[in-house]
């Protein structure tokens, strides 16, 4: 306890409070509601509609040819798998450390995940990928919590083994590896615009690609009712001729209301990404050289978006990790322990997904058992972030010293 009776600092911010939707987006959404035309294909005359415009703008922002806006990030991933022809019973490589919608997307198409391990950098273990690459022809790569692996090496491994890559960029929208935007290395990039991601429409997502056939299939899959010529970021109608009769409609479109609130947010994306990373750096600086706590190294090639913060309590016994979590919680700091044996509120590790069989992965288990995670919403100030770091530092140190 505190010897000089100063009460311990308490954090009172909310870890789930986002910024409001920009006024411009609210006005645009109200205007859509006044027309009554909310369905993406319900447009009047030459009007393009909010959804087609958003797709065009997102494709330009990502520097790709095509974009499809959809109902969720999970839907973008299942559509990506289907568009690449993944069939029930096929095996799909994916991360042992990610969030539930990723293996869920693989399960949704009846395929079977082959989990690839995680390193201390919280990225996919490329040696393990190399060893398992012959077991599947598609990798659903999750840039979990915004940590980007050596994409040059990953793409080389996948090219050598004829593995096509789908990128889950739920946490890397706006991030880059060696200057290339995340989501543009693989055949398809998938994004989420769910409330806790980098753009917020409550629910929603995108799929991007430069591949004509893949995009035509994705548009058909999303439920285009043969109205694909109304898309502004899709291949020309003749490409659809080849796929339109044998691609099922599995509806998952985005509507004008969500697109209306996303368009102004896209214009703010770069600015917001910078603001997140500034917050991340303040927390990181505040936790340097804290005994027992491992910071995650961030390579110079990685221009990450620090919308959440992770650190490792590597090889700590479970009760001590729990003590850190509860002591921080008592001071208002919400840490998630991704390594908890029993998942609560979320699942993030391969052995929580019992519908997908997996062999134990001891090296990954060691990392997973030590991962702590904290959200950094943009409603936190830089001073808030410094306070968060002081509290975590004090509580980790206290538990570490007592051991
Ligand atoms: C949120 C998330 C998704 C997609 O989520 P939806 O809720 O379906 O939009 C995909 N991958 C990861 C790692 C996520 O956190």
Image (cartoon, rainbow, N blue to C red):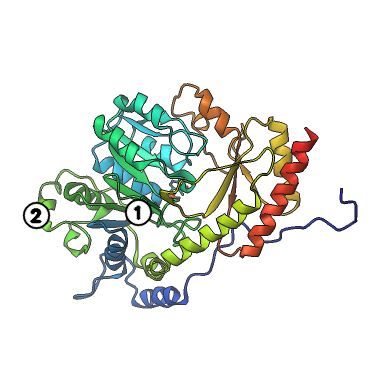
Q: At 47% across and 40% down in the image, what residue appears?
A: 98
- In the image, residue 193 sits, relative to residue 104, either above or below, namely below
Q: Is residue 345 left or right of residue 140?
A: right
What percent of the width, then of the height, locates residue 159? 25, 35
Q: Which residue reaches farthest right?
A: 4
Mark sitting earlier along the chain (2/1): 1
Front residue of 100 and 248: 100
Q: Are marks 2 and 1 in contact (CB under 8 Å)?
A: no
Q: Position of residue 188 (x, y in %)?
A: 29, 47
Question: In which quarter of the view is residue 367 placed?
Answer: top right
Q: Label 1: few (<14), some or many (≥20) within 10 Å?
A: few
Q: Residues within 10 Å of mark 2 (few under 14, many from 20)?
A: few
Quickly name the residue at label 1. 179
Q: Is residue 114 visible?
A: no
Q: Position of residue 181 (x, y in %)?
A: 34, 54
Q: Residue at x 36, y 66 (%)?
A: 259
Q: Which mark is residue 270?
A: none
Residue ID for mark 2: 238
- Camera-side mark, 2 or 1: 1
Is disc 2's CB within 8 Å of ligand 1? no
Q: Is mark 1 within 8 Å of ligand 1?
A: no
Structural distance between the alpha carbons of marks 2 and 1: 34 Å
The quadrant of the picture occupied by the C terminus is top right
- Looking at the image, residue 141 sits to the left or right of residue 208; the answer is right
As helix, strand or loop, the secondary structure at mark 1 comes to loop
Q: Is residue 129 above or below residue 104?
A: above
């Amino acid at each position: 306890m505190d010897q000089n009776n100063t009460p311990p600092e308490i954090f009172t911010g909310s870890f789930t409070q986002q910024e409001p939707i920009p006024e411009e987006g609210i006005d645009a959404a109200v205007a859509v509601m006044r027309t009554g035309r909310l369905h993406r294909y319900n447009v009047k005359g030459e009007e393009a509609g909010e959804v087609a415009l958003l797709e065009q703008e997102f494709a330009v922002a990502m520097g790709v040819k095509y974009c499809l806006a959809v109902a969720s990030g999970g839907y973008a991933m299942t559509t990506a798998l289907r568009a690449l022809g993944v069939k029930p019973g096929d095996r799909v490589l994916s991360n042992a450390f990610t969030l539930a919608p990723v293996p869920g997307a693989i399960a949704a198409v009846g395929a079977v995940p082959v989990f690839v391990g995680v390193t201390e950098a919280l990225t996919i273990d490329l040696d393990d990928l190399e060893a398992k690459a012959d077991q599947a022809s598609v990798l659903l790569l999750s840039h979990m919590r915004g940590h980007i692996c050596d994409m040059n090496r990953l793409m080389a491994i996948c090219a050598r083994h004829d593995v096509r890559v789908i990128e889950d960029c739920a946490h890397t929208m706006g991030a880059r590896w060696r200057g290339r935007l995340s989501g543009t290395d693989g055949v398809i990039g998938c994004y989420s615009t769910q409330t806790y991601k980098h753009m917020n429409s409550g629910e929603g997502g995108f799929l991007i690609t430069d591949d004509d056939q893949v995009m035509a299939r994705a548009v058909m899959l999303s439920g285009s009712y043969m109205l694909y010529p109304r898309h502004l970021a899709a291949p020309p109608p003749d490409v659809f001729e080849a796929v339109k009769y044998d691609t099922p409609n599995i509806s998952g479109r985005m509507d004008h209301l969500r697109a209306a609130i996303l368009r102004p947010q896209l214009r703010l994306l770069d600015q917001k990404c910078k603001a997140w990373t500034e917050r991340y750096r303040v927390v990181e600086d505040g936790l340097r050289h804290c005994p027992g706590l491992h910071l995650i190294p961030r390579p110079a090639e990685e221009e990450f978006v620090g919308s959440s913060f992770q650190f490792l309590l590597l090889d700590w016994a479970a009760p001590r990790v729990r003590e850190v979590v509860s002591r921080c919680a008592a001071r208002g700091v919400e840490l998630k322990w991704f390594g908890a044996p029993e998942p609560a509120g979320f699942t993030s590790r391969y052995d929580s997904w019992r519908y997908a069989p997996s062999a134990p992965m001891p090296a990954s288990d060691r990392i997973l058992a030590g991962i702590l995670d904290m959200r950094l919403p943009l409603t936190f100030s830089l001073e808030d972030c410094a306070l968060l770091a002081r509290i975590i530092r004090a509580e980790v140190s206290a538990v570490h010293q007592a051991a």
